[in-house]
């Protein structure tokens, strides 16, 4: 169980890092991107399960779903962050 949680955190952090690189200039910084990647891995796993999409098993499949989720979380975060910044002006 501990190994599963540790692996899950590593995959989520890696996907957050990669999503931050793909969305260059639109991320929230290294640490927050890693944390959002961990949240995004939950979102990606849920999304792929809801859509009944089958990915390759193991590390690669987990990384793909976590990456997609991390990108979605970063996009939503940027939208909300942009709204907050516009409301302050």
Image (cartoon, rainbow, N blue to C red):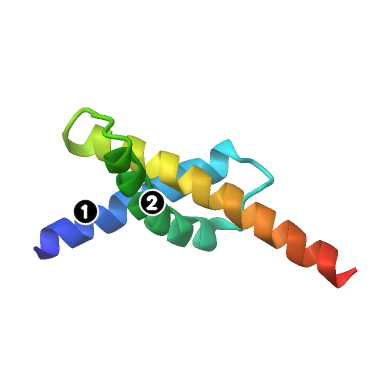
In-image side of 52 versus 21 (left or right) = left
Q: Which mark is residue 7?
A: 1
Q: Residues within 10 Å of mark 2 (few under 14, many from 20)?
A: many
Q: Residues within 10 Å of mark 1 (few under 14, many from 20)?
A: few
In-image side of 8 versus 68 (left or right) = left
Q: Secondary structure at mark 2?
A: helix
Q: Position of residue 84 (x, y in %)?
A: 75, 66
Residue at 19%, 61% (x, y): give it.
5
Residue at 38%, 51% (x, y): give it.
43
Q: Residue lying farthest left?
A: 1
In-image side of 26 versus 68 (left or right) = right
Q: Position of residue 16 (x, y in %)?
A: 45, 49
Residue in front for this viewpoint, 29 or 39: 39
Q: Position of residue 9 (x, y in %)?
A: 29, 58
Q: Which mark is residue 62?
A: none
Quote the CA–CA distance across marks 2 and 1.
16 Å
Q: Secondary structure at mark 1?
A: helix
Q: Which image quadrant: the N terminus? A: bottom left
- In this rendering, which labeled residue sits more in front, label 2 or label 1? 2
Which is more N-terminal, label 1 or label 2? 1
Write down the residue under mark 2.
43
Q: In which quadrant of the rendered view does residue 42 lie? A: bottom left
């Amino acid at each position: 169980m501990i190994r599963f949680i540790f692996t899950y955190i590593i995959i989520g952090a890696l996907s957050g890092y990669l999503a931050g690189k793909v969305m260059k200039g639109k991320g929230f910084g290294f640490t927050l991107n890693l944390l959002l990647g961990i949240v995004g891995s939950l979102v990606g796993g849920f999304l792929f399960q809801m859509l009944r999409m089958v990915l390759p098993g193991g590390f690669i499949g987990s990384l793909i779903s976590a990456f997609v989720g991390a990108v979605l979380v970063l996009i939503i975060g940027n939208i909300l962050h942009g709204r907050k910044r516009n409301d302050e002006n």
